[in-house]
Structure formats: structure tokens, C-alpha cells
Image (cartoon, grey):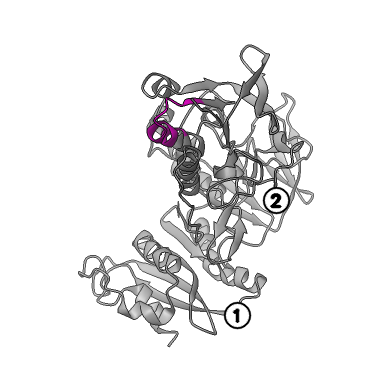
Amino acid sequence: MKQYVIIGGDAAGMSAAMQIIRRDSDEPQVTTLERGGIYSYAQCGLPYVIEGSVAQTDDLIARSKETFRKKYGIDARTYHEVKSIDPQKQYVHGIDLELDQPFTIPYDKLLIATGADPVIPSLPGNGLQGVHTLKTIPDLERLQADLHQHRQVTIVGGGYVGLELAEAFASQHIPVRIVERNGQLAKMFDGDMASLLHEEANAQGIEIVFNKTVTELRADTEGRVNALYADNEAFPTNLVVFATGIKPNTSFLRETDIELNEKGAVHVDGQMKTNLANVYAAGDCALQYHRIKEQHDFLPLGTHANKQGRIAGTNMSGTEKSFQGVVGTSIFRFLRLTAARTGISEKEAERLEVPAESVYYKGTDIAGYFTDKKPLHIKLVYRTDNHLLLGAQIIGESGVDKRIDVLATALFHRMSMDEFEDLDLSYAPPYNGVWDPVQQAARRVN
């Protein structure tokens, strides 16, 4: 009987655990260690509880700890924080936070699926009442409780989470401000495309402060935040949410010889193996191979975590399967707009010194003669030497998701711009023009 230990009880960890249970026929002993109190919940759904599309936090939980224990025989533990591992003797050491007692568990195979923690800049006042992050269900519950009385919100950071939160607050008619240290929102997009998001924010009454770095938070007489200072300019606020990115939760590995990148993410091969014997890693604490960049990258998304966890569990249980990499596809809603991207942007191509150009096309989501058609803004990035597609960005009110998935599939299979005209895409006037806007954009290269 093999002893499997998995550190982390969310997407990657529990995807791996289920594969082990299903594939290892020798009655495996699977122990999962979760430092929090909740297993298998949808982190990406947290802003939509505030927005109202999700009725309650319980709806975000896929399987409870009790389900994993009783139905699948997994020794699923909560409030067990791992402090170190001994890869030579193959032990995991940590603290049972409820009992305040140390524990040690032996393993034959170990998976590190510890995810990532939100980054809070080290600055005066970051621990005041009214200062929040959003990564877990308890984070959300604290934020919701605070919203009942304090409704002048400042979000620090204009990335995915910051924009999703801004939409959620705005939908509830809560005044919201975004402070972004760069000159645009959604820096994963090129500036010309991100300008569409700026226009939408302004149209919906969201205040945006660009090119400002938060330096200090100040409190009122009761110890609650009442002002945010950015480069010495004061902004009144009584609730602050930091959405300034995440960092891999791997500090407990620093005393080992495990290979980490500069951000602390674990290097893994195609089978999710680390450089330590019998130690695997998956999810937001691990790197992913980027098929377009042809190098490892840190792209912490739920889709990658589930896939990597599934592949890790498959390999741990003795069946070989390889992770085929990512092309960098993502999508989010911002007020009336949907914004999506895949591959690399024009500025990324320049940074990677790839010979590239782009083409821009403004089309419509359905047949152009329909009265309710919506504009689609499409940008395609391609190699100048062989017209190979490198990336795409699409922003519009409707039809974005359909097109970005076509482009992501094309990227995965290394299609050239010249081949797009041959694609047999679905057509009927309520759904498309006779030439899809993606094909229309690609034809402008020829």
C-alpha cells in the first residue's frame, strides 16, 4: 500500500487525489493537508457572489471534506499547515492549527499543490480595519460583512481580479475607484485594446487613477482606513481591496534543493515531477510550459490547476501522461464588455525578440444587417517571416468567447494566418456573418 501525501485541498490537489483513488488498485492511502477549513471551492467565482450571480458562498464548493472522507476514503484534513518537507527521509512536517500541535507524516509520493497567496505591498497602514484581499471564502465573507456599513471602495490593481471586483461593486451601485501603477488597465492586453476598457469604465462611472503607486493608508480615530495616499496624493476611502497579484505559496520549500523560479514557482517536467525524487507539483504554485513562448511561464489559472493536478495524480499512480502546455488563454467580463486573449501580445513579442506584426479589425458579432449587432474589436499578432499566428485579443459585448476559443485551438495546432480562410466555421445570420470576423481579420494580412 503506497502512502500518498498531497499538500493543498483545492483544484490541483484534489484533482490529483481523485486520479490516484481511481487508478491505483492497491488500496492507496491518500492524505490531503489543507491549511484552511474548506476543500474544493471555485476561487474564480468569488467576485460574482458580491455581484449577485452566485447566491451564496456554499454554491462555490464542489465537494466537502466529508465527501472526500466518506465517499472516496481520502484522509482529508483541514487546518493542517505544512512547515517543511524532508525529501531524503520522505517526511512532511507541519502544525495542526486547531490543536496547536506538530505533526509528521511519511510519504512514498508527495504532491505540492499549495497554490498562491495574495500580494499585499509592505506599506504603512496595510493592516488597518477595512483593508482586504480576495482569495478565499473567508476573505469574501469578511469583505461582504464590511460592505454593509462602508461603501466607498478603492481597489488597488487593475488586473483580472481588480476589474472583476470593480464590476461587482458597480453592479451593486457602490462607488468604486481603481488605482493602477501602470498607464493602463489589464496590462496583459496591448494598450490600444485596453483603451476600450478605459472607455467602458468611464462610461459606467468608475474612477481610474493611472500611474500612481500607493505609498500609505491612514486611519480615522477608530482605527479604520479613511484615506489612501498614492505618490503623496490623498484619496478618501473607507474600504480598500488589494488586487495586486499573487505569489506561489512555496516558502516552506526554501530549505530544500527543489528548483524554483525567481517568483518562487516550482519547476516541473511534463509529468509534473520536480527535481526531487518522488515529489511532484501542480497548480498555482508551479510553472506551466507556454507553447508559443517555448519556455516555462507562471500563469496561475484554474484551468491549468485542474489539468496539472489530474496529470500529476495519473503519473503518481503509475500511468504515464504528459502535460501538453498552455497557449495563455484567458477571458473576463467587465461591465458590458467581454475581454479575451490568447497567445502572446504585440509587446510580449517585442520583448521576446520575435519578428512580429499585428492586424486590427472591427467587425460584428452577428450578421451586419441585423439591427441588434454588436461591435467586435479583434487584434491578431503574427510572425512576419512565415505568417504563423502568435496571439489574439478580442473585446466586445457579445461573441468574444466563441472566437477566442477558435484562435486558442489554432494556436495549439500552430496554424498560420493564411490557413484561416479554409476553416469551416458555423454560419447563420443570428450567430455570424458569412465570413467570421476572425477570418476577416486574418485575410487582411494577405
* Label 2 secondary element: loop
Q: Percent x, y for residue 315?
A: 49, 43
Q: With 173 as the anchor, is 55 left or right in this view? A: left
Q: Residue at x 58, y 51 (%)?
A: 269
- State which quadrant residue 185 falls in: bottom right
Query: At label 2, which amino acid type do we have?
Result: Asn
> Could you classify mark 2 by the number of other residues whose Cα lies within 10 Å: few (under 14), some (14-19), or many (20 or more)?
few
Along the viewing direction, whichever of 433 and 232 lies nearer the viewer: 433
Q: Percent x, y for residue 88?
A: 70, 32
Q: Earlier in the sequence, mark 1 or mark 2?
A: 2
The vertical placement of 317 against 292, above or below, is above
Q: With 393 as the anchor, is 120 left or right in this view? A: right
Along the viewing direction, whichever of 442 and 396 lies nearer the viewer: 442
Which span of residues is magenta-colored? 17-30
Q: Is residue 54 visible?
A: yes
Q: Percent x, y for residue 66?
A: 42, 19
Q: Percent x, y for residue 148?
A: 52, 28
Q: With 14 as the anchor, is 436 left or right in this view? A: left
The vertical placement of 344 against 329, above or below, is below
Residue lying at the far top in this picture: please name it.
Answer: 99
* Label 1 secondary element: loop
Q: Residue 29: within the magenta?
A: yes
What residue is pinned by disc 2? 261
Rendered image: mark on residue 355: 1
Along the viewing direction, whichever of 140 and 146 lies nearer the viewer: 140
